[in-house]
Each structure stands twice: as structure tokens, then as C-alpha cells.
Image (cartoon, rainbow, N blue to C red):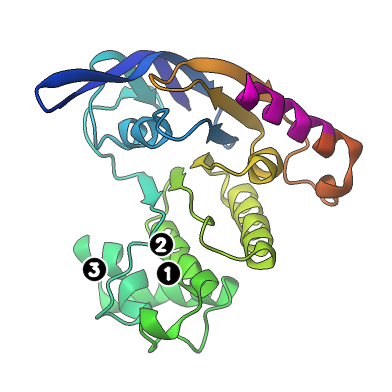
Amino acid sequence: MIRVTGVSYTYINNGARVSALEDINLTIPAGQACVLIGPSGCGKTTLLYLLAGLLKPTRGEIRINGARVTRPRRQTAIILQDYGLLPWKTVWKNAALGLALRGCSRQRQQEILEPLLAALGLSGLEKRYPAQLSGGQKQRVAIARALSLEPDTLLMDEPFSALDALTREGLQQTLVDIRRQRCLTTVLVTHNIEEAVFLGQQIVVLTAAPGRLKAVLENPEAGTPDYRFSETFHRNCSRVRQLLQK
């Protein structure tokens, strides 16, 4: 589904060229969950923006579903760390924003959003504003807005970092369920080792800046029931921690 070949990215800062990523090679099968983890400033978010088509590689190429990514694609949804909700719009209007921008009728918006909001536990909150929501509810609205566009690829930049532990774990499970139901190819950036191991069927560990691939770990049990309590989970957490400390 996603193929990253020889990708490097360099940007200009105060007239100097700064290398953010170097020679990234990565393949993510359709429907799989991939997690990017590494030290702060290693280029995780930059790689996510490259996958989204918001940035262009300095070298190399990215292909999604066989087509080269040169600009944002309609089938890719992205959820940012700060939820990206407009404070002057209600839950409904925030969730419907992408559909409205695409010219969907009110009836079509209702057909798509009503079951989606219900599935995410947001029924009855449609007229509330972001300031009236908890952090978990805000993130669910952001997820609803992304899923309403029926993407095949979902990119997430530390989506649960501001949430308490139990809310975070609940939304992690929600994400697992959504990915399986919709066969979504998912790429998530996180600093949290336990989150990376629970969510990532493929765990990509990056070096310190400029970001290079340090390891790609296969983690087929990710998201399975009671995985957090298994020896395999704790062993993989230790492995990722060791890689990050080297």
C-alpha cells in the first residue's frame, strides 16, 4: 500500500541546509498499522507530512497504492496532535467539515455522520462546541471528521499524547477496531513506547537527527485482546526501549 524508497528531506534554516531525514526505505502493506518512534527532532512528523503529500522529498519517492505522491491525495486523512477542531463550530459542523468542503449535501452528511458519531460515542453531543468537550471527546470528533471522508490511509501525529492513561488506552482500542473494520492502512507517530508496541504491527525506530532507519520490528500480535498483559508485549517494550537508548 505504501512504499517509501530512498527518501531524504532537507530544509533551509537561517540560510543553512538542515537534513531532517536520510535514505528512508519502508514498505507498509495494505490494512497494516505502522508506528513511527524515535528521539525528539528525528523527523517522525516530517515523514508523516511527506506521506500526506504536504511536503516533497528532497530525494527519493513515496508511492501509495501504486501512485507517486506529489501532493495531498483525497484518500489520505490526517489527524494532528491538537485535534485541529475549529472552536467556533459545533461537534457536528467540525465532523462534517471535510464533507462540506467536498460539496456533500446535508442529507449525505447525515447518512455518513449519524452512524459514525454514534459508533464513536458522540451521539447527543452534536450541538456542543470544542470548549465543552473533554480531550477524549475532542479526539473522537477529529477521528469522525477523518473517517467521514472514507479514506484508505490514516495518518496520525501523536493523537493521544494529551490524554490521561485510561482515556488513551480506550481510544487506542477504538483505533484498532476502526482499522480492522475498514481495513485502513494506518501510520501513527508517538513518543510512547507502550503505545507503539500495542498499536504497531510494524514498529519503525528512527535514529536521532537526521532521522535514519535504526530498526523495523514486526509485531503481529499488536492490538489483540489482553496483549498488554502478555510476556511478548513486555519483551517488545523492552526491545524498543533498548533501541531508543543506543
**Cα distance in 3D space between marks 3 and 1:** 12 Å
The residue drawn where x is 45% and y is 35% is: 40
**Cα distance in 3D space between marks 2 and 1:** 6 Å
Q: Position of residue 230 (x, y in %)?
A: 89, 42
Circle on res. 176: none
Residue, disc 2: 148
The image quadrant of residue 54 is top left
**Cα distance in 3D space between marks 3 and 2:** 11 Å
Q: Would you say the magenta stretch is mainly helix, strand or loop?
A: helix
Q: Position of residue 161 (x, y in %)?
A: 53, 55
Residue, disc 1: 112
The image quadrant of residue 82 is bottom left
Q: What crowding class fits label 3: few (fewer than 14 Cα within 10 Å), some (14-19), or many (20 or more)? A: some
Q: What crowding class fits label 2: few (fewer than 14 Cα within 10 Å), some (14-19), or many (20 or more)? A: some
Can residue 103 be seen by looking at this rendering? no
Q: Are marks 2 and 1 in contact (CB under 8 Å)?
A: yes
Magenta residues, as a range?
235-246
Q: Which amino acid, mark 2?
A: Ser
Q: Secondary structure at mark 2?
A: loop
The residue drawn where x is 51% and y is 78% is: 134
